[in-house]
Every structure is written in structure tokens, then in C-alpha cells.
Image (tube, rainbow, N blue to C red):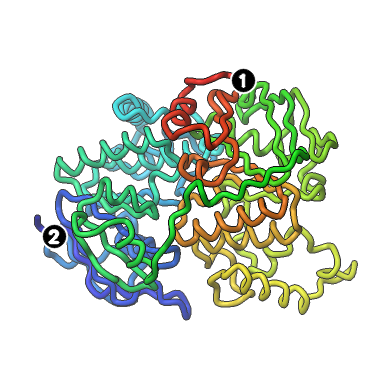
């Protein structure tokens, strides 16, 4: 195969941090090329350079053997390069149609609403991505937003597709459909870069894999040359153990920490998103909730954490009715919240790490004396958490936005776990993270379970739920389609429940 794209000696630094250190990367015509590396390894930075979001400090880019300067995404699109980002590049107030139409070539003077709507519906029907073209983006779940990004990229008829963690919000069935599409595009001569932390995925769908570590290229290999352990070792320069069901600590108390009793909740469109849902979680239990995005999980979490009103039913924490109380009161009950959208809801990106660490308790001792913040105490506290949770950052004064996704998640967990919670509500806590970060977060959740904390874990990764949870509930169409003891179920049964084949309780 001919080399369609060559990136030679790419260097990119942010202050004292070298994200790419003389990286070489090539993409052949008609291949799926996996790009692996732990969070902060430089893989997304490298692809952002190819897409024109960053300019390299040094290095050259060639397309079809010709040296090119890609100074903006518009340049990249003109060269036939599209990118689906992990952090969505959508205008929240615009509809799906409007977002897809933006940036399309040849749309002329008039806004091509009907044309784009037809394209979206045809794509949705062909590939099974269900999207309402006229819904404002702000009303969509994270999974639905990702689908819009995929449609937006594919509607540009690009010859190169860069996908950054594209399956993070997809079910196994949806992932299979996406991979079918990627293989079809490859067979048609398109070239695809797949950035993912999921080793099983690159082994299943990729032709070649390039591994980055610490901003440097470690190796590019053909898929038939390596296995899962080989790749993990290249990523981390050490062996990684993979969590299985046997790693769970079986210690569940009779005490009920959270009781959900027949609750119903409206979504942003004033339709019922949660319909008469009931379950309870015991002390020392991890209770998993599976389901395809858009089946009520988001609204359920927001109701439990005080961010959304309950229209019927009751929520109890430690036997006390907390239905429709505010989020501050919920937090004061000892509830830790790890939100789905970590950048938008988990941290204030422009604030420093130390400021983000005290968001829950800035007005309390020892961080405040009533009138003024005690910056020396806050700084020492932040340094201790950075060290304890192994957060990779320049210092405690650095803005949160400078951290990788995995380190932002560890920042959120460090802040939330510092209160010694009785209940953790964790929504997709490992979404988009590398294996090492996932392992660290799994260990933190298991440690909290072992200390008697109750954990509500929302995830679309069935294997993650089976590895960590004691029981799994599946949501479909706003209802619980089944609750299963983890040791008595399978991936296939959970997958069936996710598409509505269940008990409907």
C-alpha cells in the first residue's frame, strides 16, 4: 500500500511539557491504523496537528508525497481529512442539522437544511445511528452527541478519518456496526486513524498499530505480530494485569444506603425519561447500571444528585427522604458525584488544580476562616492529593484544562473521595481513558467498596460492569428491563436486556 500521509519528526511542546518528541507516523491508503498510548502520551496532540488545530514546533507533513502546511481545520478538510474528537466540537444551541451543515462544502448561498436532513436520515437508516435531525444539541446525551460528530465527519466525504475514542459511548452491537462501516470505508480505499485505549478493539479492527509513550513513538507493528499483552507492555513499559470477576471483594452489608422508590423523571423535552424505577444499594455494594445512551441513565443520575426534579416517587439516602432537595444538600449527605461530562461538569477548566480540589468545601475549615481563604493550607492540601492520586501535572497552580482526560478524572475522584463518602455516583468514570488510568480508577472504586461505601456505577462497558459490580440493572426506554446478580449473568444476557429483551420491572 502507498503512504497517503507521512508525518516526519513532529515536535510539539506546551510550556515545559513535550507532547510530541520527534514523532514519525505514516498512514497508508486503504488501512485502519490504531494509535495507542496512555493518557498524555501525545496521540491526540499528534492527530490535532494533522487536523490543523495545532501547529507543530518542528517537523513536516506530506500528503501523496507532497509537503503541505495544515494551518487550520479548514485546510485539513480541504485536504480530505476529518476528525471526530473525544471532547465534542458542537454548538450546543444549534440543532443536529445545523451542526452537520456547518463546514460542508458546496452548500451555496442558501442554508441546506433539507439536503442535510436527508443525508442524516439516510445515514441513520443505513448504519443504525438513530438521531433526530431537529433536536438541539444541548438536549442530547453524550452518546448521542458523539453520533452527531461521527455523522458530521462522514458527511464531508473525506478520504482520511481520524476517530478519537469513537466507541466510548457505544454498546457492543453499535460498536460492531461502526467497525463494519470502518471496514467498508477501508475497502473503498479510505484511510482511518483509530485512537483508542481498548486493546481488544485495535486487535479486532486495525491493520497496523503505532504505540506512543511519553511523547515518543515506541513502535509501529502489523496486527498479526502482536497480542494484547505485547501492546500493554509497549504502552507502559511494564506488564499490566487485567481485572476479572475474581478480583471483586465480596463484602455487601444489609444496610441500605440508597433507595430509589418508583421514581419518574422528565427530560429536557418534558417527556418521561425515567419511568417508575425502583432499586436499592447496600453498604459495601457496587450496583451497576447498563444501557444504551438516551434510555434515562442521565436523568436518573441527575435526579439522585439533586440536579433534576422528580415528578413521582421518592429517593432515600440512609433512610432519609431527599426527594427534590438541592445538589448542595445531597452533597452534604456524604454523596460523591463523578459526572459523565468531566470537563463541563466535573471541573472548572480555567481554575487551578488547587481551586478545583476545594470546590466542595471552600467555605469550610480548614480552607477558610470565615472571611478569607487560607491559601497556604489549600496549596499543601492540593500537593498532598496530587501525590496520593498520582496526578501528572506541572504543579498545583496549573489550570485543570492542561491535564489529560485521565488526570482530570483522577482530580475529580481525589476531590470527591476526600470527604469519605457513604455513596459514590460514578457516571462513565473510565470513558475514554487508557488501560493504566482505568485500572487505577477501578482500584479506587473497589477500595471504597471495601471500606463500606455504596457505589452506583453507570457504564456502557459491559465488561467493566461485570468486573466490578455485585448486581447489574439494565435501563431500556426509561425502565429497568432487568436486575441480575453479576455471578449469574453473561455479556450476552446483559446485551439482550439493553435492547429491551427483559423483565420490564
Q: Which structural element holds mark 2? A: strand
Q: Mark 2 points at which residue?
A: 3
Q: Can residue 405 be seen in this view?
A: no
Instruction: Name above or below for residue 414 compared with residue 283.
Output: below
In the displayed structure, does residue 419 sit left or right of residue 406? right
Residue 409 position within the rendered picture, expressed as x and y whole percent measured from the top left: 57, 58
Judging depth in this view, the residue of 44 and 319 nearest the camera is: 319
**In the displayed structure, does residue 367 sit left or right of residue 52?**
right
Q: Toward the viewer: 285 or 92?
A: 285
Q: Which mark is residue 81?
A: none
How many numbered discs sit on the rendered protein?
2
Can you say whether 296 is above or below 436 in the image? above
In this rendering, would 180 be left or right of 504? Answer: left
Residue bearing the label numbered 1:
505
Residue 157 appears in which quarter of the rendering?
top left
Residue 230, percent across and down? 30, 62
Name above or below for residue 134 compared with residue 467.
above
Q: Give the Cα separation between the discs numbered 1 and 2.
A: 55 Å
Q: In which quarter of the image is residue 435?
A: bottom left
Query: In the figure, 17 relative to 330: above or below?
Result: below
Say which residue appears at 63% left-offset and 58% top-offset: 412
Which is nearer the eye, 207 or 89?
Answer: 207
Name the residue nearer the viewer: 104 or 284: 284
Percent position of residue 202, x then y: 30, 51
Picture quarter with the N terminus: bottom left
Question: For the view shown, which residue lies furthest in the right direction?
Answer: 370
Amino acid at each position: 500500500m502507498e503512504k497517503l500521509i507521512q508525518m516526519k519528526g513532529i515536535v510539539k511542546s506546551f510550556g515545559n511539557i513535550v507532547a510530541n518528541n520527534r514523532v514519525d507516523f505514516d498512514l497508508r491508503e486503504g488501512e485502519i491504523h490504531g494509535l495507542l498510548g496512555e493518557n498524555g502520551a501525545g496521540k491526540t496532540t499528534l492527530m490535532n496537528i494533522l487536523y490543523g488545530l495545532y501547529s507543530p514546533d518542528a517537523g513536516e507533513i506530506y500528503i501523496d508525497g507532497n509537503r503541505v502546511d495544515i494551518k487550520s481545520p479548514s485546510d485539513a478538510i480541504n485536504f480530505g481529512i476529518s476528525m471526530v474528537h473525544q471532547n465534542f466540537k458542537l454548538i450546543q444551541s444549534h440543532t443536529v442539522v445545523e451542526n452537520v451543515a456547518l463546514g460542508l462544502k458546496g452548500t451555496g448561498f442558501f442554508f441546506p437544511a433539507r439536503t442535510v436532513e436527508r443525508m442524516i436520515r439516510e445515514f441513520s437508516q443505513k448504519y443504525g445511528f438513530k438521531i433526530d435531525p431537529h433536536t438541539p444539541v444541548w438536549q442530547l446525551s453524550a452518546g448521542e452527541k458523539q453520533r452527531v460528530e461521527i455523522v458530521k465527519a462522514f458527511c464531508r466525504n473525506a478520504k482520511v478519518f481520524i476517530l478519537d475514542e469513537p466507541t466510548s459511548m457505544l454498546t457492543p452491537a453499535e460498536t460492531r456496526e461502526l467497525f463494519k462501516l470502518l471496514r467498508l470505508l477501508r475497502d473503498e480505499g479510505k484511510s482511518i486513524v483509530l485512537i483508542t485505549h481498548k486493546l481488544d478493539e485495535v486487535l479486532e479492527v486495525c491493520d497496523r498499530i503505532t504505540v506512543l509513550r511519553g511523547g515518543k513513538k515506541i513502535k509501529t507493528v502489523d496486527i498479526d505480530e502482536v497480542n494484547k499483552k505485547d501492546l500493554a507492555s509497549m504502552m507502559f513499559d511494564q506488564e499490566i494485569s487485567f481485572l476479572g470477576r475474581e478480583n471483586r471483594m465480596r463484602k455487601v452489608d444489609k444496610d441500605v444506603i440508597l433507595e430509589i422508590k418508583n421514581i419518574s423523571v422528565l427530560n429536557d423535552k418534558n417527556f418521561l425519561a425515567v419511568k417508575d424505577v425502583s432499586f436499592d444499594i447496600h453498604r459495601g455494594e457496587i450496583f451497576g447500571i447498563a444501557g444504551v445512551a438516551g434510555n434515562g441513565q442521565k436523568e436518573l443520575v441527575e435526579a439522585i444528585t439533586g440536579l433534576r426534579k422528580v415528578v413521582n416517587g421518592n429517593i432515600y439516602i440512609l433512610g432519609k427522604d431527599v426527594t427534590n432537595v438541592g445538589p448542595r444538600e445531597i452533597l452534604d449527605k456524604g454523596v460523591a458525584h463523578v459526572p459523565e461530562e468531566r470537563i463541563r461538569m466535573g471541573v472548572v477548566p480555567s481554575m487551578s488544580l488547587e481551586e478545583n480540589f476545594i470546590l466542595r468545601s471552600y467555605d469550610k475549615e480548614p480552607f477558610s476562616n470565615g472571611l478569607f481563604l487560607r491559601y497556604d493550607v489549600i496549596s499543601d492540601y492540593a500537593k498532598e492529593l496530587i501525590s496520593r492520586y498520582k496526578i501528572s501535572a506541572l504543579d498545583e497552580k496549573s489550570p485543570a484544562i492542561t491535564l489529560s482526560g485521565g488526570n482530570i478524572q483522577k482530580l475529580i475522584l481525589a476531590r470527591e473521595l476526600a470527604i469519605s463518602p457513604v455513596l459514590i455516583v460514578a457516571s462513565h468514570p473510565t470513558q475514554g481513558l487508557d488501560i493504566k488510568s482505568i485500572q487505577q480508577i477501578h482500584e479506587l472504586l473497589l477500595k471504597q467498596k471495601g471500606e463500606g461505601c455504596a457505589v452506583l456505577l453507570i457504564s456502557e462497558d459491559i465488561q467493566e460492569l461485570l468486573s466490578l459490580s455485585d448486581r447489574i440493572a439494565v435501563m431500556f426506554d426509561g425502565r429497568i428491563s432487568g436486575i441480575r446478580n453479576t455471578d449469574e449473568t453473561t455479556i450476552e444476557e446483559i446485551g439482550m436486556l439493553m435492547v429491551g429483551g427483559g423483565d420490564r420491572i
